[in-house]
Amino acid sequence: MNIRSIPVIATLIVIAAAIIMVMLGFWQLGRADEKNALLERYQATDRAGTPIAYPLGADALEANLYRSVSASCETVEEISGRAGTNAVGAKGWAQIAQCRTEGIGSFEVALGWSRAPSPPVYTGGEVTGILAPGGKIVADPPLADLGPLAKPDPADLPNNHLAYAGQWFFFALTALVIYFIALRSRTRRRPDES
């Protein structure tokens, strides 16, 4: 392969792209470590302690996930059934109440589990439960004569960053291999003129 036959601009673009992809791979490795630390912190959360008052500020929400919380549901705006799992792993319906409280606004409470999608009768009141991602409270004990839902578990949160890192490294390698093959086929079509 004659070095003069290598296109400079295309080579620089491919090398720059591969370097960026490798950097993104290392960034994802760092994110994987951060996510592992976050999951360990969530696992260590005291779920049986004294409930903290809901709502929490936006910054405090993530810091208090999986903790026991209490709130007052003054007005029930709507109750809807969504796919859910009970405490023993049976599939059915999680009954979700959209609550509103003066000075707080709207928030969701997962009242409990049922086999039927039809909403239960629930008019509001005091709620205790576990703070789940998204700021939803999973009632514990369940309300409205429903069965217990599976408790939110930090182990259910995915940590895909290692897979993403592998993808970026693979993309970089693939780009370099394809470019090398393209260069070889180009030089075979244009024999050296010496």
Image: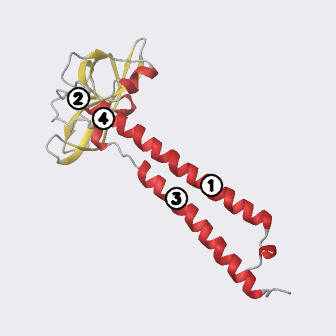
Q: Quadrant of the N terminus?
A: bottom right
The residue positioned farthest toward the front in the image shown: 194
The mark nearer the N terminus, 4 or 2, is 4
Please, is residue 172 above or below residue 139 in the view?
below
- Residue that carries the numbered disc 4 in the rendered image: 40
Q: Using the numbered discs, state the Cα–Cα distance from disc 4 to disc 1 in whole angstroms.
A: 32 Å
Number of marks present in the image shown: 4
Circle 4/circle 2 CB separation < 8 Å? no
Q: Using the numbered discs, state the Cα–Cα distance from disc 1 to disc 2 in whole angstroms.
A: 59 Å
The residue depicted at 40 percent of the width and 41 percent of the height is 33
Circle 1/circle 2 CB separation < 8 Å? no
The mark nearer the N terminus, 3 or 4, is 4
x, y percentage for residue 100? 38, 20
Which picture quadrant has residue 144? Answer: top left
Q: Using the numbered discs, state the Cα–Cα distance from disc 3 to disc 4 in whole angstroms.
A: 27 Å
4 or 1: mark nearer the eye = 1
Q: Using the numbered discs, state the Cα–Cα distance from disc 1 to disc 3 in whole angstroms.
A: 10 Å
Residue 121: mark in rendering:
2
- Residue that carries the numbered disc 1 in the rendered image: 19
Q: Which kind of residue does numbered mark 3 sit on?
A: Phe
Please, is residue 115 above or below residue 123 in the view?
below
- Residue that carries the numbered disc 3 in the rendered image: 169
Q: Using the numbered discs, state the Cα–Cα distance from disc 4 to disc 2 in whole angstroms.
A: 38 Å
Please, is residue 129 above or below residue 10 in the view?
above
3 or 4: mark nearer the eye = 3
